[in-house]
Amino acid sequence: EIVLTQSPGTLSLSPGERATLSCRASQSVSSSYLAWYQHKPGQAPRLLIHGASSRATGIPDRFSGSGSGTDFTLTISRLEPEDFAVYYCQQYGSSPMYIFGQGTKLEIK
Amino acid sequence: EVQLVESGGGLVKPGGSLRLSCAASGFTFSRYSMNWVRQAPGKGLEWVSCISSGSMYIYYADSVKGRFTISRDNTKSSLYLQMNSLRAEDTAVYYCARLTAMESFDYWGQGTLITVSS
């Protein structure tokens, strides 16, 4: 069973700063099936990145994804006030079929 | 505009049953696999179940296997989750989500809250 471990658990930054979020898989995974989501309280999760590095429709270019094998990164180049949320990575696996990391909370410093 | 609207949530006693619905609009529902994903209070996202476009393939998380049943009605553009033998640990917001060819979830509903408590 693949486990996705996100770090840090909480990231405290100020608007305008750069955010780097990590997602590490317990075994090598296909980058084609690695996605990132943004989730705000009371809202639907929002797909940001699919295929490890492709931005979803309508996602600003300050969001970027990278990585391969076991290590993946979501970078937000310059934080806007609306970017403070919880971020999840997700991978297509076998059992369970879809796996989420435990999340990184990005909070305003 | 793609819309997914869940309904059917509420308070249920342990051992009870509940049926969730998800009404889809703004896209050709019959062409997409659909999923249920849940979030327990204070926890992260957990995938629950997936059904292929024509209902041929169905998958469940181990935590709900044998208790939950996913189904769909393409004529009504609707997704369902029959939840039986509910436990306190099933308490969560349940989201329906559309699956892409890249095995990611591109559209989500706002969620419906299930509370299992005596």
Image (spheres, coloured by chain):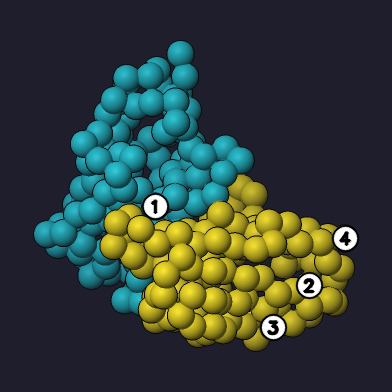
x%, y% of residue B61?
Answer: 31, 48
Name the chain under label 4: A
- Are discs 2 and 4 located on one and the same chain? yes
Please, is residue A67 above or below residue B28 in the view? Answer: below
Q: Which tag is nearer the camera, tag 3 or tag 1?
A: 1
Mark 2 to mark 4 CA distance (whole Å): 13 Å
Residue to which mark 1 is pinned? B47
Name the chain under label 1: B
Mark 4 to mark 1 CA distance (whole Å): 31 Å
x%, y% of residue A91?
Answer: 42, 67
x%, y% of residue B28?
Answer: 27, 69
Q: Residue furthest left?
A: B56
Please, is residue A31 above or below residue A4 in the view? Answer: below
Residue to which mark 2 is pinned? A80
Q: Decide which of B55, A23 is in the foreground and name it.
A: A23
* Label located before the other in sequence (3 or 4): 3
The amino acid beneath tag 2 is Glu
Q: Are marks 2 and 3 in contact (CB under 8 Å)?
A: yes
Mark 3 to mark 1 CA distance (whole Å): 28 Å
Q: Is residue A83 visible in the rendered structure shown here?
A: yes
Residue to which mark 4 is pinned? A109
Residue to which mark 3 is pinned? A62
Q: Residue furthest top?
A: B118
Badge 4: residue crowd in 10 Å (few <14, some 14–19, many ≥20)? few
Badge 2: residue crowd in 10 Å (few <14, some 14–19, many ≥20)? some
